[in-house]
Amino acid sequence: MDLLSPIDVIKGVGEKTTKLFNKLGVYTIEDILLFFPRTYLVYPKPSVPDKDLVNSLVSIEGRIKTSPKAYRSKNRMEILSAIAYVDDIPVDLVWFNSNYLRSNFEPGKVYIFYGRLVFDNGRYKMSQPAIFTPEKYLELQKQIQPIYHLTKGLSNNLVLKSVKEAFEHCRVSKDRLPKEIEEKNGLMPYDKALLTYHFPETFESLVAARRRLAYEEMFFFILNSRLQEDTAVSFPNEFNLEHHTKTDEFKESLKFKLTGDQEKVLSDIISDLTGEYVTQRLIQGDVGSGKTIVAFLAMIDVALSGYQAAIMAPTEVLAKQHYESFLAWVKEAGLDIPVVLFTGSMKVSEKKVMQKLVDENDACLIIGTHALISEGRTFGDLALVITDEQHRFGVQQRDKLSSKGNHPHIIVMSATPIPRTLAMILYGNMHVSTIKELPANRLPIKTCVIKESKRATAFKFVADEIEKKHQVYIICPLVEASETTEAQNVTDYSKKLKSYFRDKYAIGVLHGKMKPAEKNQVMEDFANHKLQILVSTTVVEVGVNVPNATVMMIENANRFGLAALHQLRGRVGRGDAQSYCILMNASQDNNESERLNIMLKSNDGFFIAREDLKLRGPGDMFGVRQSGEFSFKVADIYQDADELEMASADVDAILKEDPSLDNHLELRSTLNSFLANQFYVL
């Protein structure tokens, strides 16, 4: 098998399975080798059913006294049921459309059942449990089981078999990095790391494999960035841009005063716009620090100078909010500057009206989503391009928007606080500005960490806030229930809430598997107060400004990095009312409690990011990834900060000796291959 062979050359992968793999972005043998597990499962020791274990994933060792019964439900579904006795405790077992399992059982024998334990109508129950003989289960307990991302129709077992088959029939390169770098940094060989990351024998070997793969990702990322910097051309600033008194007058007329950090960043931008060369600048600003007004003031200077300025937002709802804010600010300032909007859901006739405004006005403010870079969209003299929440756009998308103008100035804005040392490595070709101060009228968000036993108190608090006409976010790590992951999911959680509150409140659901139009509608309904509670995955982290939302409740908070928690917390606290963040800690680990308590000490994202860097280690690799602004397959810039700095130093050492990699032809070839399989956002 060749690495570039199509996935269907693998034994057992037919046309139907190929289409399912394609849905997950797996097309070739190399793709499936790089289709890494999302987490791992270590089967637990069998437990005796207990109320404390209800709704948990457990294994039980039970005796089947009589043969399972098969019957059809009212809707014609095949059902297989049995009773397992753990000592004298009966546990009802049920499987759907699985009557073939009936022949697996022998009355009187003991089996191990693994699944989610529930308690209903006075009896313990398990639905769709996995079945093992005690001998087989004992063998499995010694192994670490990889768990993959799946799509409907594709089982974890089929992915597992396909990955094993790929490893058995193709050759993976052993050396991809210079030998001296591997030896100096104590890195596992690439082929061994790849195999171990899929099929680890021990936790220690898994950590070592992950370290190697994370280091390599960041090494090639930095190497590519440095080579691009060296070949980048500095374009003369041919735009006749000036700073205008009308911009200052509008700034002074605002109901709020800009913070010192906002003023400093604005000064940096003015210096860029009026400088000798076209520039690129990153603006790092905590959630709610006021990046949007800074962007608007910069765009006004550009428009008053007779040019066009564009800002690209990651969601339609956010783009519309920018549009409405900009329209109001332009009117307040008494300026005759057109403001236009382009989103994917707009009618063709609406887009034509907006395009006509762009065509007829040398100076205007342009706002949009990806629709800004669609074919046929043309601009005049575009002097400034801003991407809001930059990590949602790939470098190709940003370049495509920039290409609509003649080498415009570029500003990228990020709400993710990255310590400056890491930012300088990751954004080596950009000037970096930081907004740390929050506006003076912002009340600090009150945060608490609570255990499951206090859930009723938390729900009462949620209800009290809704009665005050406020709104609530509730975040769950999963979209739907998982047979392998112990965590809350939005699908079941929203149903439980409706039952708990007896349909008293309007509850919306939001997650990444929904179609864009559905997501936009839910966010619009929440922004327009049609929903009181929004149950969501972390997709809500970026999206919309809802000043009326005062509560952010995060389930399984122990599964998130602190930086991710801080990002989510920043969705509230945007209005005049006091806001709150409730962190539900499902872990029994005291270290987790200590880590989450850092969220109580500060509302400063940069402080939290630094503390997170100190605390996170190789044991934190199974939670929710937190640095989504870079589409690394394995690496996390917080967790792998040491490897990031190490890779940066190694790249600099190589390029100092061999700036064009003339003496490292294999390394250049590997870099090209690596980039073909990686999509970075920077």
Image (spheres, rainbow, N blue to C red):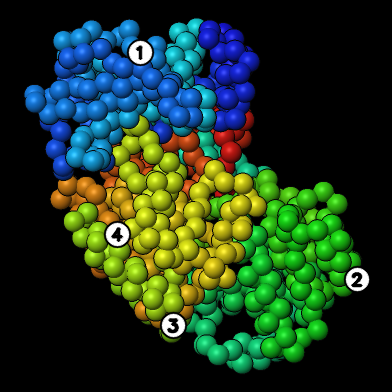
Measure the alpha-carbon separation of dots 4 and 2.
52 Å
What amino acid does circle 3 point to?
Asp
Quick one: SS at disc 1? helix
Tell me if I can see residue 527 in this picture: yes
Measure the alpha-carbon separation of dots 4 and 1.
42 Å
Q: Is residue 136 left or right of residue 49?
A: right
What amino acid does circle 1 point to?
Leu
Q: Which mark is residue 583?
A: 4
- Compared to residue 64, the image places residue 224 above or below, namely below
What amino acid does circle 2 point to?
Glu
Which numbered disc flags the more N-terminal residue, 1 or 2? 1
Neighbourhood count class around disc 3 (C-alpha, 10 Å): few under 14, some 14–19, many 20 upward: few
What amino acid does circle 4 point to?
Leu
Measure the alpha-carbon separation of dots 1 and 2.
71 Å
Quick one: SS at disc 2? helix
Quick one: SS at disc 4? strand
Label 3 sits on residue: 576
Neighbourhood count class around disc 1 (C-alpha, 10 Å): few under 14, some 14–19, many 20 upward: few
Label 1 sits on residue: 101
Q: Nearer the viewer, mark 3 or mark 2?
A: 3
Tell me if I can see residue 216 in this picture: no
Label 2 sits on residue: 360
Measure the alpha-carbon separation of dots 4 and 3.
22 Å
